[in-house]
């Protein structure tokens, strides 16, 4: 195996066919989750905010599973309880230091957090400071009533894929806090922090990804440039959550549109219906398109679709160079998302389809995931994986 192939393969891991567009989450685990029913909320942490308190779960999840959280919540925006207003205020700013980026709507996985009294809440508003790649700050906002939870992370796009690798939670928290101050709606004297709530690191950056970063990015993560021999813990600062009291931003938000294509051309571990040692080489384009509309009454609607047909070839990576071990087949992949937010309600829903064609055979099948959460709708997560048979009606 050549060095270039080894590096690319390790970068991708098992995620290339997920096409999650911002796959900074932990892998799906278990046979599935609750469907069409209320899901028990996780244990809450209570913190003082001004003269009141906020009870919330300081994590996010893509599976409504508190046992395997994705990312730590690192912001509580108090006073302004409408993520749409925060979106409009940030998008009205000019370029942000130190990345010299501007805020826009973000393509990314749907996630949920939870707080009292409403329970689970989806991130109907997702923002990015910077384009889809190579680097950006990704911010998810969760409406919890009189306040908004924020989860921010600094990430890099893994070349040749639709996946991002989180590099730092701490840096993102600092930049978002600075930009909220730049809106003029926050008095610096009112900023506060909670006691330590989450660990000072969460998850890791694979060493091969870290070593592929330029020295400047390595230094942003660890404080000093230089390659490493083992995976790097992702810094989460001191584990405290920044509390940002914010006044209301009254100007209306505007819609947005983005569309682009990502070309896959990589060797990866087979993402599902996998036997030990199964690797495949994947080629083909995937088109991504997202529209965010803001109606005259302020209602925000977001629609996203990723769609592509990929060629998949089994390969043997124990020899150098890797060689095909079977005939090529097709993978049809789609991902759909929809989000909606008004003055009184919000919800998000997502679905990911993957089908190996033909679907019959012990190593073939399909995977379908789904997440729906929001105001006055049943909490819903499901995962169906079908290998070795064609699914019936």
Image (cartoon, helix red, strand yellow):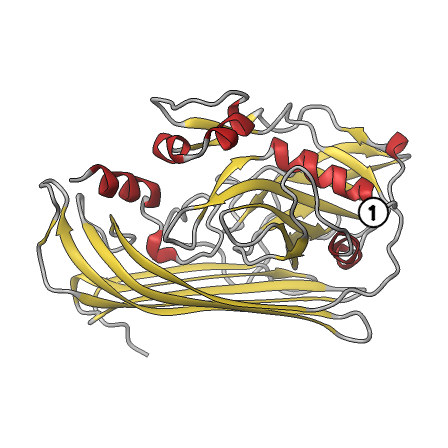
Check the image and report above or below for 179 versus 196: below
Mark 1 closeness class: few <14, some 14–19, many ≥20 residues within 10 Å: some
Check the image and report above or below for 300 versus 131: below
Question: Where does the image place residue 272, in percent across and percent down from the top left?
Answer: 28, 54
* Figure disc tally: 1
Nearer to the camera, 236 or 172 = 172
Q: Secondary structure at mark 1?
A: loop
Residue at image location 9% in from the left, 41% down from the top: 319
Q: Is residue 92 left or right of residue 339?
A: right
Is any part of residue 307 visible from this angle?
A: yes
Looking at the rendered image, the quarter that the C terminus falls into is bottom left
Nearer to the camera, 168 or 113 = 168
Residue at the disc numbered 1: 183
Q: Is residue 38 left or right of residue 96?
A: left
Is any part of residue 74 visible from this angle?
A: no
Q: Is residue 320 left or right of residue 365?
A: left
Q: Residue furthest bottom?
A: 393
Residue at image location 48% in from the left, 45% down from the top: 24
Residue at image location 70% in from the left, 62% down from the top: 375
Q: Is residue 252 left or right of residue 134?
A: right
Question: Where does the image place residue 288, in percent across and percent down from the top left?
Answer: 47, 66
Question: Where does the image place residue 139, in percent across and percent down from the top left?
Answer: 64, 47
Looking at the rendered image, the quarter that the N terminus falls into is top left
Question: Where does the image place residue 280, in percent across and percent down from the top left?
Answer: 20, 54
Residue at image location 23% in from the left, 68% down from the top: 330
Check the image and report above or below for 289 versus 28: below
């Amino acid at each position: 195996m050549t060095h270039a192939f080894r590096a690319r393969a390790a970068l991708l891991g098992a995620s290339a066919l997920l096409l999650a567009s911002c796959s900074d989450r932990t892998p799906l685990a278990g046979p599935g989750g609750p469907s069409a029913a209320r899901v028990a909320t996780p244990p809450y942490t209570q913190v003082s905010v001004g003269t009141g308190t906020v009870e919330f779960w300081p994590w996010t999840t893509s599976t409504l599973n508190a046992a395997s959280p994705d990312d730590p919540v690192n912001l509580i925006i108090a006073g302004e309880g409408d993520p749409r207003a925060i979106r409009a205020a940030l998008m009205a700013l000019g370029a942000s230091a130190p990345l010299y980026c501007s805020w826009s709507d973000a393509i990314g996985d749907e996630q949920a957090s939870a707080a009292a009294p409403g329970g689970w809440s989806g991130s109907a508003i997702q923002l990015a400071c910077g384009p889809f790649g190579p680097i950006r700050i990704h911010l998810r906002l969760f409406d919890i009533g009189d306040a908004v939870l924020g989860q921010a992370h600094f990430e890099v796009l893994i070349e040749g894929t639709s996946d991002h690798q989180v590099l730092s939670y701490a840096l993102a928290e600092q930049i978002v806090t600075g930009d909220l101050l730049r809106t003029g709606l926050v008095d610096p004297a009112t900023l506060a922090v909670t006691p330590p709530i989450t660990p000072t690191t969460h998850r890791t950056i694979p060493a091969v990804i870290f070593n592929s970063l330029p020295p400047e990015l390595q230094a942003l993560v660890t404080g000093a440039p230089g390659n490493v021999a083992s995976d790097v813990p992702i810094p989460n600062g001191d584990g405290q959550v920044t509390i940002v009291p914010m006044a209301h931003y009254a100007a209306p938000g505007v819609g947005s549109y983005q569309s682009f294509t990502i070309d896959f051309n990589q060797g990866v571990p087979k993402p599902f219906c996998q036997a030990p040692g199964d690797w495949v080489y994947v080629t083909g384009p995937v088109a991504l398109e997202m529209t965010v509309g803001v109606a005259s009454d302020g209602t925000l609607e977001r629609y996203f679709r990723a769609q592509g047909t990929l060629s998949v070839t089994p390969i043997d990576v124990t020899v150098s160079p890797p060689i095909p071990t079977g005939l090529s087949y097709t993978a049809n992949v789609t991902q759909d998302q929809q989000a909606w937010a008004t003055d009184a309600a919000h919800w998000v829903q997502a679905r990911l389809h993957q089908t190996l064609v033909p679907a019959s055979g012990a190593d073939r099948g399909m995977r379908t995931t789904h997440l729906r959460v929001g105001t006055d709708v049943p909490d819903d997560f499901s995962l169906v994986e079908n290998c070795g048979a064609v699914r019936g009606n």
